[in-house]
Amino acid sequence: MIDLDIRPIRSDDVAEVARLDGENLSAWAIDHFSRAVSSPHGWHLLARAAPDGTLLAFICGQILDDEAEIHKVAVRKTCRRQQIGRRLIRHALAYLHGLGARTCFLELRATNLAALNLYRSSGFQRCGLRKKYYTSPLEDAIIMQGAIGEEQQAAGATPTA
């Protein structure tokens, strides 16, 4: 298993994070990441391989009061199916719990079965659908909700490594 160094994204990481995001459908522009990192409600984490520092993945979103959102998760294509995304989500949920979040929402393309399985195995459940939400290609978005901290444990949804 790859050793990970997980930490908040800093402004000097933005260009590298944007390049990694470019491997995905629906990639954000670099200025979008810059604004997100400077947002007072934003939270952003990256995972680097230890000890060489190669950027492997990132996760970002926002938090307001006790409710968090995951806006984006990306894992380097060559590193997928190695539990990096699952470990990063688990770390993010603990991080969000420390910030006072009790529940977390996210949305994903209805056809993204790998992500759907990842989120389900991390304790998220489907709670809604947005028809024709995504473009290029046009498709629905599944909305998911997950409990954080004690609420997560009470729901029996503790993520596994």
Image (cartoon, rainbow, N blue to C red):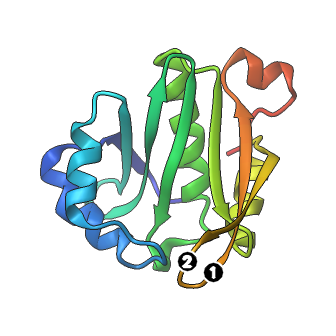
Of residues 39 and 117, the one nearer the viewer is 39
| In the depicted structure, whether residue 97 falls above or below residue 47 | above
- The answer to whether residue 136 is seen in the rendering is yes
Q: Position of residue 43 (x, y in %)?
A: 38, 36
Q: Which residue is mark 1?
A: 138
Q: Position of residue 87 (x, y in %)?
A: 57, 48
Of residues 113 and 26, the one nearer the viewer is 26
Quarter of the image containing the N terminus?
Answer: bottom right
Image point (34%, 55%), residue name: 48
Q: Amino acid at mark 1?
A: Leu
**SS class, disc 1:** loop
Snapshot quadrant of residue 18: bottom left
Is 44 placed left or right of 158 in the picture?
left
| In the depicted structure, whether residue 92 falls above or below residue 51 | above
Of residues 82 and 158, the one nearer the viewer is 158
Q: Which residue is mark 2?
A: 135
Is 113 placed left or right of 50 in the picture?
right
The answer to whether mark 2 and mark 1 are in CB contact below 8 A is yes
Image point (64%, 54%), residue name: 107
Quarter of the image containing the C terminus?
Answer: top right
Category of crowding for the residue at label 1, using alpha-carbon neighbours closer than 10 angstroms: few (below 14), some (14–19), many (at least 20): few
Image point (44%, 52%), residue name: 3
Q: Amino acid at mark 2?
A: Thr
